[in-house]
Image (spheres, coloured by chain):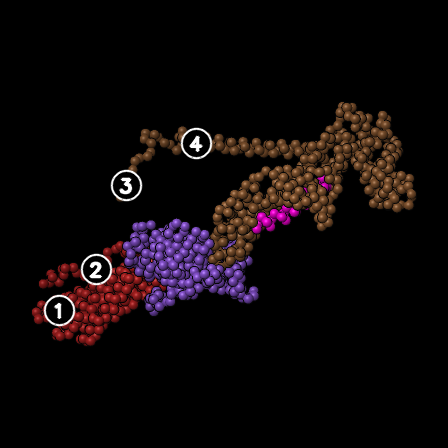
Amino acid sequence: MTDMSAGGPDIRPAGKESSLLAGSARTRARNAREWRMKAYGIGAIVLSLSTLFFMLATILMDGVSAFRQATISFPLTVDAAIVDKAGNRNPEEMAKVTTIGYKRLLAQGFVAHLAAEGIDTAGVPEKDLVDMLSDDGPARLRDMVLADPSLVGQVVEVSVYATGRIDGYLKGRVTRETAERDTNVTPEQLDLADNLVAAGLLTMPFNWGFLTGPDASDLRPEASGLGVAIIGSLYMMVMVALFTVPVGVAASIYLEEFAPKNRLTDLIEVNISNLAAVPSIVFGILGLAIFINFMGLPQSSSLVGALVISLMTLPTIIIATRAAIRAVPPSIRDAAMGVGASKMQVVFHHVLPLAMPGIMTGTILGLASALGETAPLLLIGMVAFVTNYPAGPLEGGVMDPATALPVQVYSWASRSDPAFIERSSGAIIVLLVFLVIMNVAAILLRRRFERRW
Amino acid sequence: MKEPHILSAFDRDLEAVQAYVLRMGGLVEQALLDAAEALETRDEALAQKVQQGDKAIDALEEQINEECARLLALRSPTAGDLRTVLSVMRIAAALERCGDYAKNLAKRSLLLSNMSPLGGTSASILRMARTVVLRLKEALDAYIAHDVAVAQDVRTRDKEVDQMYNSMFRELLTHMMEDPRNISAAMHLHFIAKNIERVGDHATSIAEQVIYLATGAMPGDERPKAEMLSGAEPAAGR
Amino acid sequence: MMDDMRLVERDVTQLQAKIEAKGVQVHYGEKHALKDVDVTILDRTVTAFIGPSGCGKSTFLRCLNRMNDTVASARVSGKITLDGQDIYDPRVDPVQLRAKVGMVFQKPNPFPKSIYDNVAYGPKIHGLARGKAELDAIVESSLKKAALWNEVKDRLDASGTGLSGGQQQRLCIARAIATSPEVLLMDEPCSALDPIATAQVEELIDELRSQFSVVIVTHSMQQAARVSQKTAFFHLGNLVEYGETGQIFTTPKDPRTEAYITGRIG
C-alpha cells in the first residue's frame, strides 16, 4: 500500500531544463492568448463607448438648440378699437374677436415700434415684416388680453416667437443662399433680423414653451412643445406602475413560494419568459383589439396606452421580481421556519423585505424601458396630433387623447420642416433625462435599502 | 492554576481524574502507615484491614484508567492537558504498586506477629515507612501545586530512604549471622524494608511525573542513588 | 465530591424519553434516505448524530420538527412521538410543532434585522409576550441563556449580521430558545465557526442541557464526543449504533462504528 504513493511514473519532461526565469514556449503562448483575449475585450468596450459617445454627441448637437428660441420683444398698445369694438370690456363680446384681429394689432404695434426705433426696413415690404412674427403670436396675445381685459388701451411689452426661418437663421440652419430659393423667407428679412438683433429686439432666451407647450402644426414649428407628451408619459408611467407592481409581485410570490412544481407551472413559467420576448408591436395590436375595439375605451388615451404597456412590462417585472425573491438566501427561510413562522409570515416578514431592493430596481428599469416604448402606442392612436392638454387625472384626464414622449419624437422626426429635426432631437434629450432620472432613482433606492440590512 | 477551558466540562473531567489520584494517594499513604503500625504493635486486625483496603485502591486505579481512556477518547487533550492525563495514569500505576507493597507489608506483619521480635527492627521499619510516606505526600503535594522545586527535593532526598534501607540491611544481616533461627523473620523484614524502599522509588517517579507535567520533559540527570547494588558492600563483610 | 458529580452527570438512565422514533423511513423521490430508524431521545440530554456525509443524520434531524415537509419530494413514514404525541398526526400544525422543537442551522443565519428583533421574532409571531416589557424580559433571558447578553446588551439595536460568526450562531441559538422550546435541534451548528467560537457554542450546549433536550448533528466526531451524553452513529441510512457517548468512543459494539470513529471508513 505505502509504496504506491512513493512510486509512480516520473511526469517531469526528461532532459528538459526548466528554469523559472526563462518562460517555456507553452507559457509564452498561453500568456499571448490571455493578452489577446484582454485586447478583444478592451476593443469591444472602446467600440461601444465610442458609439454611445457619437450618438449622444449627435443628439446633443442637434437638440440643445431646441431649448432656445428666437423671440422678438417690443411694446404694444392694445388698441381698444380692434379688440373691444363695443368698448364695454365685456369678455364675452371681446372673445368674438378672432386671432385675425389680434394679428392686425400685433402687426400694427410691430411696425410702429420699428419706425419708432428707427430701424431700417428697406427692401422689406410690410407684409414680409409682419410675416417674421410667428402665427402663434396673435393667439397668445389674445389669450393674454382675454385673461386680463384691463390691459385694453394700455401699453404692454409682448414677446413673440420669430418664425421658424428666422429662428433657423439665428441657429445657422438658414443662410442667405437658401433664403433666395425659399418662398417663406427673403434675404432682406434676414438682413432685418440682423438689425433687430443689433437693436436688442430679437433675442434667444431659454424656451420654456418647448417643455410645456402643446404640439403645433407644420406651419409654425417654433410654437410646438412637449407639454402634452410629457403629461401623457407621466400619466402612463404612474398607471403602469399601479397596474404592474401589485400584479407582478403577487404573481411572482405565488409562483416562487406557493405554486406546486408541476407541468402547469412549468408551462406558465415558459410562457412568461416568452412573453418578455414578444415584439412590442404585437402588444399594440392586442391592445387595439381588446381595449379599443372590444372594450370600447377611447383611442389615443393614456389609459389604453398604460394598459398596453402594462401587458408588455408585466413579464419583465415578474422575471425581475422572481429573480430577486430567489436571491434571498434559503437560510433565511429556514431560520424563519425554524422558529415556527408560517409560509405567509416567512414571505412577508423576511423574503419580501430582503427582495425589495431587487424588486424595485427591476420595476424601475422595466418602467424605464416602457417609457421609451413607441411601437404599441402607434397602433392605439397615440401618435395623433394632440394640441389640447389632457384634463387632470381626477377629472378623467386619463381618457383624454394624449401622446407620449417617444411617439412625439417619432412624429416630429417624420415632419417635413427642418425645424422639427432639431425639436425631435430636443425631445430625445428630454426623454433621456427622464430615463437617467429613473435609473438614478433605481440605484439610490437599492443603495438605501441595502444599507438598512 | 491555569485559565479554565471554554468548555467547562473538560475542566470538570480533568479535575475529576486528578481528584481520584489524590484520593488514591491518601488511601495508599494511610495503608502504608497502618501496615507499619500493625507490624510495630502486632495488631492483626489493623493488618487485616490494610489487606482488605487494597481492593479499594485497585478499584480506584481501574477507575482512573477508565476515566483517562474516556478523557483521551472524548476530549482529545493536547499539550499540558495531555501531559496531565498521561501523568495521572503513571502516578495511578505507581500508587497502585505502593498499595500492593502496603498489602504485602500487612501480610508479612501477620506472619511476623507469630515470631519473636528482632530487636528494634520493627520500630526502624515504622520510621522508614513514615519517612517514605512523607516523601509520597510531598510528591503528591508537588503534583497538586505543579511545584518543580518540591519535586526536585523529593528526588534528591530519596537517598535518605536508601540509606535507611542500607543500615536496615546490615542490621538484619547481623541478626541472621547471630542466630540462624532469626533468618525467617529477618528475611520477611528484609523484604518489607526493600518494599518500603521501593515505595520511595515510586515517590521519586511521581516527583518526576510532576517535573514532566510542569516542564514537558523528564529530568535528564541520573537519579541520585545511595542504595547498594547486588549487596556489594555488605557482601564484602561476609 | 467532584468525581461523584461527574458520574451523576453522566448517568442518563434516570432521564425520561422526550422523543421516540419507531421505524422511521424517509424517501427522497426514488432515494431511500433513511431505513427503519428507532431512537429514543432523552429529556435534558445532548444527543449527537454522527456519520459520514449523506448517511441520513440530517434527514432524521429534519424529521423531528417536520422541516422535511418543505421538501416536496420527501416522504416520511413510521412514527415519531414528542411526549407521546405523534408529530405526524394530521391534526398537528407543523408551525406549532416548530415552536416546541426549535432548530439551529449549519450556517449562522440571523435575520438581517437588529439583535433585539432577531430574538423577539419568535415570541412575537407566537404571541408569547403581552406588551413590550414582557418581550424585553424574554429577549434578555434568551440572550443570557445563550451567553451573549454581556457582549450585546449595549447594542441591541445593532444589526445581527454585524456580529462575529460565533456570536451570530449564539444569537441564532438565543432566537431558537426565545420561543421556549422543549427540544433544540442543531444541524452542524459549528461547521462554519473557528475553534474558539466552536468551544463557546459547545459550552453553551452543555449548559442548555439543564433545560432542554438537545439533538446535534455533527461532522466532527470530536465534537460529538465533547458535548454529548448519547451518540447515534448513522451509516448509509441505517442507525448502526446508539449508546452512551463514552462507550461509543472507547468500546463501540458494532465494527462499522469502530471503523468510522477510528477513521477507517468514511
In screen coordinates, is A102 left or right of A446? right
Mark 2 is on which residue type?
Lys
Q: Nearer the viewer, mark 4 or mark 2?
A: 4
Q: Which chain is red?
A: B
Helix, strand, or loop for circle 2?
loop
Per the rendering, the mark at residue A30 is 4
Nearer mark to the viewer, of 2 and 3: 3
**What separation in Å lies between label 4 and label 2 (alpha carbons)?**
75 Å
Chain at numbered mark 2:
B
Residue under mark 4: which chain is it in? A
Q: Distance of mark 4 from mark 1, alpha carbons? A: 94 Å
Q: Colour of chain A?
A: brown
Q: Which residues are magenta?
A: A226-250
Nearer mark to the viewer, of 1 and 3? 3
Q: Position of residue C84 (x, y in %)?
A: 40, 65
Answer whether residue B155 is visible to the viewer in this image.
no
Residue position marked by numbered label 3 in the rendering? A4
Q: Is residue C226 left or right of A81 when viewed as pictured?
A: left
- Chain under numbered label 1: B
- Which of the chains is purple? C
Q: In the rendered image, which residue does mark 2 sit on? A: B225
Give amino acid for label 3: Met
Q: Amino acid at mark 1?
A: Ala
For label 1, the residue is B186
Q: Is residue A395 above or below residue C202?
A: above
- Work out how far the residue at label 1 is from the one at label 2, CA to CA, in angstroms: 24 Å
Closer to the chain start, of discs 4 and 3, is 3
Helix, strand or loop: magenta stretch: helix
Percent across and percent down for residue A124 are 84, 27
